[in-house]
Amino acid sequence: MPHGPGGERDTGRRRQRVERKMIPPGTRAEPLAQDVESSERSQIETTDARTSPVDEPDKPLAQDGESVERSQIETTDARTAPEESASTKESPGFNSGVQNVLTEEMTERFMRIMTSHAAKRSNNAAKVRRESVNCCNLTVERDFCDVDDGSFRSSKARIVAVRASPSVVGLSSFSDGKRIRVCSGCVIASNGSSDTTKILTSATLVRSLSTNNSVIPDVKIKVCLPNAHILDGSISMVDFHYNIAVVEVNSDQKFPEAVLVSDVIKRGAVLALGRFYDHGRLMCAQGEIRKQASSFECSELLVSSCHTTMAGVGGPLVKYNGQVVGINFYGENHTPFLSTAVIIRCLDHWKSYGKIIRPWLGLIYTPVDMLPLRVLEKCTYIDKGFYISKVAKGSPADVAGLCVGDVLIECAGKVVSTAPELGALLLDLCNKQMESYTLESNMTMEVVVRKQLNGREARMTVTADVLSGCSYYSWYDPLPSYNDKKMATMRFMEYY
């Protein structure tokens, strides 16, 4: 409360009287009754001061109010203090001593609180770390869907997706009790009489995280069916070169089989489908097949503009008539897919020979219509064919006379324009070779190229080697994103 003129002097005198009453025992000689009377007198004076008129209402109120409250507190402490001796003698510097004692007590109490808080924080952090270790077994690959915007195109896409959904499944791989990857797939064979269902997916599902071309040790497969049932699966076929795999499950239920197109589809609107393993929901993304080269090493890949996630790897890419034209992989800026024209031939090889037989030419090529403009400008032939960008020294292509800059126009008497077409043709030639000869036999084929030096066509014979088991494409398989950091952050926010 504010005071009138001279209020500061009255307050000072009252404070001195209160301080005299708080002098420790042994410094005062007056009896306790005098202390009580002095305390009551101080309390009455404090009350009178609180009710004094206000002469300067414009001055701040905080300082005087705090002084009065402090006087009340100190007076109460003096009244309830044990027996003390009375003395009218003032103790210089005692007020600062009391403040120091209070400051030390508050500091000590504050340190105890902070120590307790730090211990609790440390225990909670240790608990978060323990829980995050247990939870890091679960991947948090995101799902995807872009057909719920209400547009006419999305409405049509939703109908196609629902009709194809009975053959779309979700898969997950486990090892040593930990979940490794999540993928999608589609049913390609379902035999109700034998209770066996075959599912086409990506070899990414079982590819080891430490090595590029080996199966995860002691891998276990779980399959989420369209009816949301989870069944155990087993690997019946895996090929790391083309990054494809087949998983078998035992089920007495017959599922619709996806229709795989045997020809290469070069253009058109498509849908990337998948099924999220965690909740079993259907995923769908719209897009179109682009005339664009993939950034992957596999030259047979095409690219679509569908935006998917790692959870969609191995899922089918379908046309609007419901037919499957490829299986999807994951790229950061695009969605590459392997044409079913190549997949069907790989499955035939595996069924006949227990492995996929393919020739090795020793060259790297790119379709002419996918070349960058700076490279296309230097080509001697810009119609159809494959621009040869690299030839391995001593390879069948090098021995035959093919050079960098040449354009491959024909192979085995057929004009090819896309990489999947050439890949499917080479697989067919290998199949014919295997029907007549043994696996160790070399395969010969005639090719027509447009030479870089003079622009003339040249017919050559290439004696191709059968690809050895240790030669594979290199695949970009991003490591699964585990949720240990995310879980730890979420739990930390719960505690604080």
Image (cartoon, grey):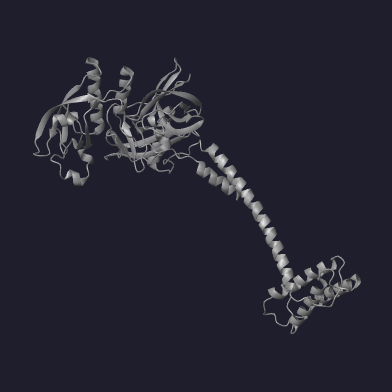
Q: As displayed, is residue 163 above or below residue 49?
A: above
Q: What x and y, as percent, mark residue 63?
A: 69, 74
Residue 380 placement, left or right of 262: left
Can residue 159 be seen here? The reply is no
Looking at the rendered image, the quarter that the N terminus falls into is: bottom right
Query: Image point 51% across, 38% down: which residue?
Result: 136
What's the residue at 45%, 33% (across, down)?
Answer: 182
Q: Where in the figure is residue 115, as x and y percent of width and height?
A: 65, 53
Q: Quadrant of residue 101?
A: bottom right
Q: Using residue 60 as the reference point, say whether residue 290 is left or right of it.
A: left
Whether residue 321 is visible: yes
Decide if residue 406 is on the left or right side of residue 112.
left
Where does the image place residue 249, in percent across and percent down from the top left? 45, 22
Q: Front-most of 255 and 424?
A: 424
Q: In which quarter of the view is residue 58 placed?
A: bottom right
Q: Residue at x 75, y 70 (%)?
A: 70
